[in-house]
Image (spheres, grey):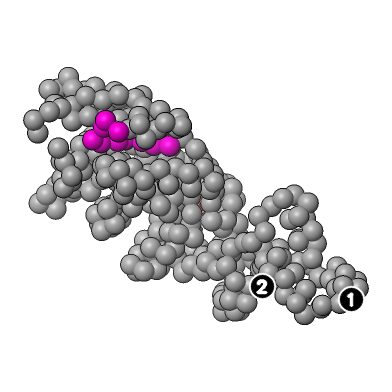
Amino acid sequence: MDRRLRVAVGRGEWHDEFAAALEAHVRGGAPLEYDVVDIDAHDWQVKVAPYDLIIWKGRFMGPEFAGHYKEKVYFIERVLDKVIVPGFATVWHYDSKVAQSYIFAHWDVSSPETVASFDYDDARERLDRASFPIVAKRSHGASSTAVRLVQDRRSAQKWLDRTFSQELWDRYKAAHPKLATRWTTAPWHRWFWAKVLQRLLHHPRYGVVYWQEYIPNNDADLRITVIGDSYAYGFWRRNRPGDFRASGSGLLDYETHIPEEAIRYCLSLNRQFGFDSMAYDLLIKDGVFVITEMSYAYVDSAVLGTPGHYVLGSDDHLMYEDGHVPPQALWVDWALTKFSRSTNGL
Ligand SMILES: Nc1ncnc2c1ncn2[C@@H]1O[C@H](COP(=O)(O)OP(=O)(O)O)[C@@H](O)[C@H]1O
Ligand SMILES: [Mg+2]
């Protein structure tokens, strides 16, 4: 490399921590320079142009803004041909459990049986085969806010009627061309009122149902956070009292043993899929770990609280290093490694 590596840290979440980690590299003599750059500004393409490597954790949540973030990550990586962390492989399925289910199914990732359907008849047919309770989830969301148990077929049917009210209304219109009959009979159907509510509240017209088989007998979930292809942290999250859900309970457990096979499995997934960072939520089904969901975005304080982290050596030896290491420092280490391995390096 005959000039210094230019690193842009995108303003957003964690930019101070990334800058501090880069500063430590500079002090250690690494041939790099960095700036904090506002990628949210209108002229972001001009702003990122001078840089070789971009580290940017967007600060926006929710599917709409996650969508805008993903578009920029795609553009920076695939059109501007720059190295970005997290890259598109890491973020394209962010905040979409539906999208994650495609990966889990295609690559046979150990996970609960999952159904994602955009079609009323198909969803009904799958529900007929389901054993209850099922765990219904909104595709986006965090902290268990959009995750609930559906106890029986009747409640599940109500859920389908609500979700697919537009599809059912479209069908009804086609089957009842006479306006008078349509308007006098439709209100007897549950989906009709869901459709009315959707119109009044300007909710999205079309829906998707997503559910998983219920994995019983778990009083906690295991959160394995992997950074790059060799760093990992692990901790447990206890369920809320009297609840099957752990995420968002705040009941972190750093004491209970973290099984090595779970850490190795999640590290292998990061390697297989080229993820820059991923937090995996695991439950135990009949003695085997299953991944319920994954996300590149997570609460850093929970990770920093772990008394140590794991490093997978090139000899496949899994080492444990004591001490609280901020995940951002490992993101930066990984970003520099990823850059040096990239073919479009300096
Ligand atoms: N299939 C399942 N069976 C049993 N419990 C589950 C299942 N999926 C999730 N949970 C519980 O619900 C919590 C929230 O689910 P999760 O899919 O992680 O959604 P969130 O995005 O809200 O974190 C998990 O922490 C876990 O305790
Ligand atoms: Mg979760």
Highlighted range, magenta? 49-58
Please name the residue shown 54% across and 46% down the image. 64
Three-letter residue code for mark 1:
Thr
- Quadrant where the N terminus sits is top left
Q: Position of residue 290 (x, y in %)?
A: 39, 62
Earlier in the chain: of badge 2 and badge 1, it is: 2
**240 or 167: nearer the eye?**
167
Three-letter residue code for mark 2:
Arg
Please name the residue shown 22% across and 29% down the image. 6
| Residue 54 covered by magenta stretch | yes
| Mark 2: C-beta under 8 Å from nearest atom of ligand 1 | no
Looking at the image, is 32 positioned above or below residue 153? above
Dot 1: element? helix
Q: Is residue 41 visible?
A: yes
Comparing labels 2 and 1, the label whose residue is closer to the camera? 1
From the image, tell me which residue sits under label 2: 153
Tell me the chief SS of the magenta region: loop
Q: Identify the disc placed on residue 181.
A: 1
